[in-house]
Amino acid sequence: MEPHVNHVHRIPWRTLGPVLLVLALPFLLGAWKLSTGPKINPNLVQRIEDGKTKKHEILTWFGDPQDTERLPEGEIYIYKTYRPKSELPRVKREEPKMVMPTVDSPYTLEREILQKKTSNKTLPSQELDSTLVIRFKPDGETVQSHDYKQY
């Protein structure tokens, strides 16, 4: 009889690291894509023909709109893209004020207290890059008009 040997096969970390990186890469790229948002392709905008282009073509080219309005005159699709804002305007800060404590008790110390100064750091923000507004005819299937603006 052969002795029973219990061998546990372990995956070495050297091979597991690159595999995990390859698996995580699409998620990282997807998060980046979500933060920057989809872009409106100007070449596709030029293909829109008022009175001829159908709703299914718009949805194929640009995807689902960020905003939709339903009016008696027809439906409106609104697409917006954003870009990172490089610099926010700085707000002029006042100097810290000197505040005297209120005398509520005979034990209050008579000394000046400085208010906490706020930082001048700015948070990253986004600004509007382009908009595409598509108005459909009352039939709901054909483009009546469209407006594309790039800022």
Image (spheres, helix red, strand yellow):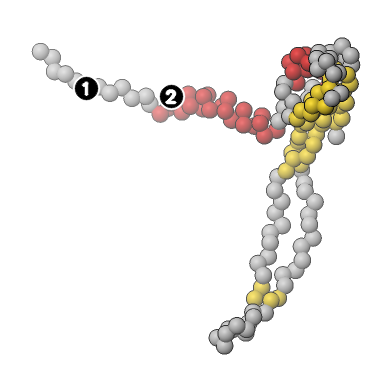
Q: Residue at x 86, y 23 (%)?
A: 73
- The part of the image, by quadrant, that contains residue 46 is top right
129 shown above or below 45: below
Q: Nearer the viewer, residue 139 or 86?
A: 139
Report whether residue 123 is seen.
Answer: yes
140 shown above or below 151: above
Q: Residue at x 81, y 17 (%)?
A: 140
In the picture of the structure, the residue carrying the numbered disc 2 is 15
Q: Which SS class for mark 1?
A: loop
Report whether residue 46 is seen.
Answer: no
Coordinates of residue 131 in the picture (x, y in percent): 82, 30
**On-image quarter of the C terminus:** top right
- The part of the image, by quadrant, that contains residue 112 is bottom right
Coordinates of residue 98 in the picture (x, y in percent): 71, 76
Q: Residue furthest left?
A: 1
Q: Are marks 1 and 2 in contact (CB under 8 Å)?
A: no
3D distance between C-alphas at marks 1 and 2: 23 Å
